[in-house]
Image (cartoon, rainbow, N blue to C red):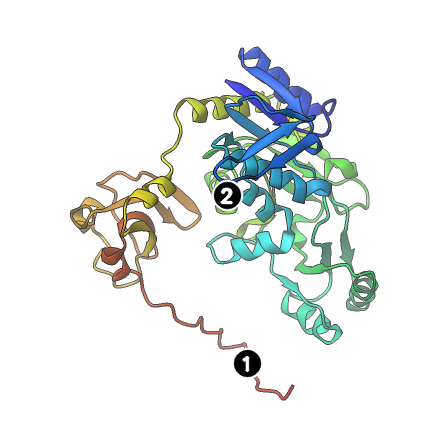
Amino acid sequence: MKLAILSCGPKSYSTRRFKEAALQRKHDVKVLNTLKFAIDLQQGVPDLYYRQKPLSHYDAVLPRIGASITYYGTAVVRQFQEMDVFCANTAHGITNSRDKLRSLQILSRHHIGIPRTTFVRDKRDVLPSIERVGGAPVIIKLIEGTQGIGVLLAETIKAAESIIELLQSQKQNVLIQKFVAESKGKDIRAFVVGDRVVAAMRRVAQGQEFRSNVHRGGVAEAVELSDEYSETAVRAAQIMGLRVAGVDMLEGKKGPQIMEVNSSPGLEGIETCTGLDVAGAVIDYIAAQVDFPEIDVRQRLTVSKGYGVSEIYVPEGSKFIGSTIVGTKLSEQDINVLTLYRGAKAIPNPRSDRVLEAHDKLLCFGKLEAMRGMVPVRSRRRRSPEVKELDTAA
């Protein structure tokens, strides 16, 4: 396999480890500076130049895109995708994860725990928003902060108002987030590769610092995750569209609460505290995808008129409840089940004898006309009884 590692920091620990792991496995690997590419566009021939020369062929790309170059970096990754080069993380996935608000918006519609969060611009909305997330203390976050930078704890409502007003006066977009008291000073980082967690650590803040990031002086310890935490981490990465990700979770009373999904997770902290070859796991995964690529459903869509992908929901009272997948007779209608989603768990290529339960979701490929009748009509989500709707004049 010929692998390109996109990185502006060839001497950083993570880049060096990825290169070392690839060389140990006899792969041809090069570290390419993301900012040294030129993107050429012409009809039918997407191309890349590197340091003023045509780029040679690569089998795969491992993007390490820093937050400061997200726009250009994702443009380069997208060009590799258009050239049919396998990318460990796609431009779409990187973009989803880089914006904290966008990532929480995507996660919020799925059955995955996230701290209650609100985003406001009008000063008059600040107090009601703080109350909705549970009152002070609250966490205030810059939407594009990294490594704990731009994450503040406001102990009182007055302090929260002052911080938000100051940040907004500097044209900063901020999130107001529920403070998960039971996890104060600690969190879980799960390193996801493909459909499994290959390593995990608990990060614990030191002294009066509430942020547990290693870059903020936090201490890391290896941890064995329960199935609930592992499945939540993998599901979150999949929802974001990432194959390689660092998923940060709080240990809440009701289970894991996703804080962030990182598309370029660092290796030093997690490899040091676990003693595991995380870099090797990533390289092995990429090599396997290059040797045995996944079926690209989009290609099937372009050659199969009237076929597509749709999600079929199994509500309470459905005739599918208690039936096996084969018993639904979907296959007889030319509908194939690709993935079964059950709560936070994703089951790719489920067995035909698996019994369906209420609230299961089936991601299917098949005749759109046949599936259309199985997709329930969307209805406006009803507010909970304690939330009152008021009609007020503008």
Residue 45 visible here: yes
| 2 horizontally vs 307: left or right | right
Residue at image location 73% in from the left, 42% down from the top: 68
Residue 245 visible here: no
Above or below for 20 versus 5: above
Q: Which mark is residue 388?
A: 1
Q: Report the Cα–Cα distance between label 1 and label 2.
A: 36 Å
Q: Secondary structure at mark 1?
A: loop
Q: Position of residue 274 (x, y in %)?
A: 62, 25
Q: Quadrant of residue 91?
A: top right
Q: Quadrant of residue 163?
A: bottom right
Residue at image location 47% in from the left, 55% down from the top: 110
Q: Which residue is mark 2?
A: 241
Q: Nearer the viewer, residue 96 or 123?
A: 96
| 386 horizontally vs 314: left or right | right
Above or below for 311 versus 136: above
Q: Secondary structure at mark 2?
A: loop
Residue at image location 25% in from the left, 43% down from the top: 354
Residue at image location 58% in from the left, 36% down from the top: 77
Q: Nearer the viewer, residue 91 or 81?
A: 81
Q: Nearer the viewer, residue 50 or 75?
A: 50
Tally the marks: 2
Q: Position of residue 329 (x, y in %)?
A: 17, 49
Mark 1: amino acid: Lys
Q: Position of residue 129 (x, y in %)?
A: 67, 69
Image quadrant containing the C terminus: bottom right
Mark 2: amino acid: Gly
